Image (cartoon, rainbow, N blue to C red):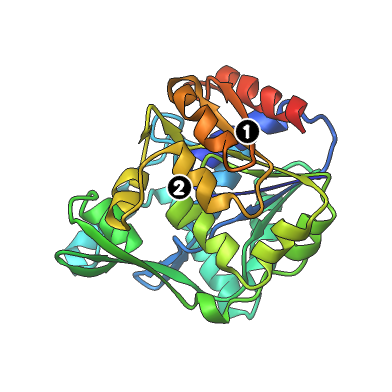
Amino acid sequence: MITALGGGVGAAKFLEGLCSVIGDEQLNVIVNTGDDICLNGLNISPDIDTVIYRLSGVIDRNKGWGLDGDTFNSLNSLERFGLDTWFNIGDKDIATHIYRTYLRGKGHTPTEITSKISEAFNIPQNIKIIPMTDQDVETWIQTNEGEMHFQEYLVKRRMVPQVCRVTIRGINHASPAPGVIDLIKNARAVIICPSNPIISIGPIVQVRGVRDALKNTQAKVVAISPLVGGMPLKGPADRLMRGLGLEVSSAQIARLYSDFLDTMVIDIEDGHENQEIADLGLKTLVVDTVMSDSKKAATLASFVFELI
């Protein structure tokens, strides 16, 4: 049994590659929900949906999120009512959010809802996708232009404001979703996906008991850096790390994970950081981590699978 932690496009790509090499072995994916947002009355879980869409083969591969071939008629029509339309929700995608919101209204937990959505999208039986918590948490970014929800910073403001602080609202009261701790403790390997360390992995390890479970598990814990040549291929990891006073490097990410990590996987372009990571007492694997297509994602996953 393998357990993976992650969120975002990079994690979804890697997980698709991993699923192609693990055969029938059980894979549990604990997904960040700090990116969740309630918009126009709909409960939206971007990281969970991106993982489900990718693993079910229906994702828009050009964008890396949303559903392939989607249209945006509903979003365009909402403009006449003066509602927010900056968050790009397609017509088929919106059905997922309506279904999620409907089930929340019926009293179902995010864990139960994620299971139902996974089943509807025909996720294989040996793959279990789980939210990090059933409590509502939200990532907010304090910027030089004021505080805003992470999605507003990312999508509406296109990462332009300068980051000053990151706050995960509700995280102090968030308990792990059912099974999360056991899935970490009982795994033969735990993989930290190539995800943003601040707003994708950070919220997961801040959920009560998760970091301790990572430190105490007998499983080998492997992390893949989302940086290539000291920069993210997508997303605001560099802006967030720099705004928090952190060095933008794979070695810095290794330091953030060092209390529970065994091995750090870094890109060839960052091979010069190998010794700095080794000085933390960690093993390293230097390979090509750029997942420009499914074949390259599977190749990276094969390296990690062999490692564990």
Q: Is residue 132 left or right of residue 36?
A: right
Front disc: 1 or 2: 2
Residue 196 locus on image (x, y percent): 45, 47
Residue found at the very far left of the displayed protein: 145
State whether residue 57 appears in this view.
no
Residue 16: mark = 1
Q: Label 2: how many residues lie within 10 Å, few (<14), some (14-19) or many (20+)?
A: many
> Which quadrant of the view contains residue 233?
top left
Position of the N terminus, as image quadrant, is: top right
Position of the C terminus, as image quadrant, is: top right
Residue 70 locus on image (x, y percent): 41, 40
Residue found at the very far front of the displayed protein: 279
Q: Is 24 situated above or below 48?
A: above
Q: Nearer the viewer, residue 302 or 74?
A: 302
Q: Nearer the viewer, residue 49 or 170?
A: 170
Residue 129 locus on image (x, y percent): 68, 53
- Are dots 1 and 2 in contact, CB under 8 Å? no
Q: Is 260 situated above or below 10?
A: below
Q: Tag 2, which secondary structure?
A: loop
Residue found at x 20% / y 54%: 157
Q: Amino acid at mark 1?
A: Glu
Residue 196: mark = 2
Residue found at x 39% / y 35%: 63
> Which quadrant of the view contains residue 235?
top left
Disc 1 and disc 2: Cα gap in Å? 18 Å
Q: Nearer the viewer, residue 10 or 102?
A: 10
Residue 291: mark = none
Q: Nearer the viewer, residue 75 or 173?
A: 173
